[in-house]
Image (spheres, rainbow, N blue to C red):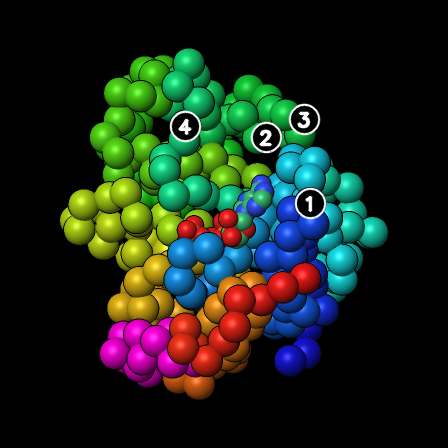
Amino acid sequence: MSDPAVRTVNLNVYYGKEQVLFDVNISVPRRGIYAVMGPSGCGKSTLLRTINRLIELRPEARVKGRVEVNGLDVYRDLSPEQVARMVGMVFQTPNPLPHLSIYDNVALGPRLHGLARGRQLDAIVREALEQAALWDEVKDKLRKPATTLSGGQQQRLCIARALALKPSVLLMDEPTANLDPVNAAKIEDLVKSLSREITVIIVTHDPEQALRLASRGALLFKGRVVREGVLSSVITSSREYYDILRRLAVETPVARA
Ligand SMILES: Nc1ncnc2c1ncn2[C@@H]1O[C@H](COP(=O)(O)OP(=O)(O)OP(=O)(O)O)[C@@H](O)[C@H]1O
């Protein structure tokens, strides 16, 4: 693939002596939604955290191989701050900073990076909340604590917080796992509309969600990519997904470093 948004080359990740990713090679095109699938513990979150260097917060973690974002090696060509600006992240559990207001949660990134103040910052906050489909619900209570929002609204606030830095890539680690179906559907619609402008990599346990959203993806099993590429070459139905996992569970011995 020419000019991917994200590419990993022979990526190996270890926690202490335990290897959890083995020669992972994925290519994620610009814009669109890329699904990272696989059973619990196969390394999906580790892969996301390796892309944005969050893995470095774990002193026992070691990364070998290459991760590129927009053609730049994130470990050699970029500082952690530059990576944080280019690659946003949203987690499974909505995690707004509870002591900060709705406004201050979204303004946090631009302030930390010294990007804007005053009216300029107001405009960035508004745009991010609009992009996250939350502006109309919060415009009259921007100074209220983020914790006054519902779970679904808090997750959209976290998306707005990530968008405020205008990332070109958004990593989403099971962003709907803790939401009811109505709020989950809102997040899915939002992800679809965001993916017209930015690249979204979404980790999901749910093959139906991958089939609804993604055009490409990877299936991981015990730290290895077993299928990768256009979604129809990875899975075509949830039944096929579970069949593949069942077969792999029988065939694959426990991977050892
Ligand atoms: N800090 C750590 N130290 C040692 N092992 C770890 C650490 N964090 C994760 N692991 C192990 O690494 C493997 C991959 O974990 P990871 O969280 O990336 O998987 P996952 O596919 O995202 O799982 P889930 O779907 O349950 O969130 C698992 O075996 C996990 O137990």
Q: Is mark 1 within 8 Å of ligand 1?
A: yes
Residue 42 higher or lower than 61, as above or below: below
**Of callouts 3 and 4, the N-terminal one:** 4
**Of callouts 1 and 3, the N-terminal one:** 1
For badge 2, the amino acid type reads: Pro
Point 38% across, 43% down: residue: 92
The answer to whether residue 169 is visible is no
**Of callouts 2 and 1, the N-terminal one:** 1
Q: Alpha carbon of mark 3 to alpha carbon of mark 4: how far?
A: 20 Å
Point 40% across, 77% down: residue: 250
Q: Which residue is mark 4?
A: 96
Q: Which residue is mark 2?
A: 110
Q: Alpha carbon of mark 2 to alpha carbon of mark 4: how far?
A: 15 Å
Magenta stretch: includes residue 241: yes
Place of residue 196 in the rendered image (x, y in percent of width and height, measured from the top left) = 44, 63
For badge 4, the amino acid type reads: Pro
The answer to whether marks 2 and 3 mark residues whose Cβ atoms lie closer than 8 Å is no
The answer to whether marks 1 and 3 mark residues whose Cβ atoms lie closer than 8 Å is no
Chief SS of the magenta region: helix
Disc 2: CA contacts within 10 A as few (<14), some (14-19) or many (>=20):
many
Disc 4: CA contacts within 10 A as few (<14), some (14-19) or many (>=20):
many
For badge 1, the amino acid type reads: Gly
The answer to whether marks 2 and 1 mark residues whose Cβ atoms lie closer than 8 Å is no
Stretch of the chain drawn in magenta:
234-247
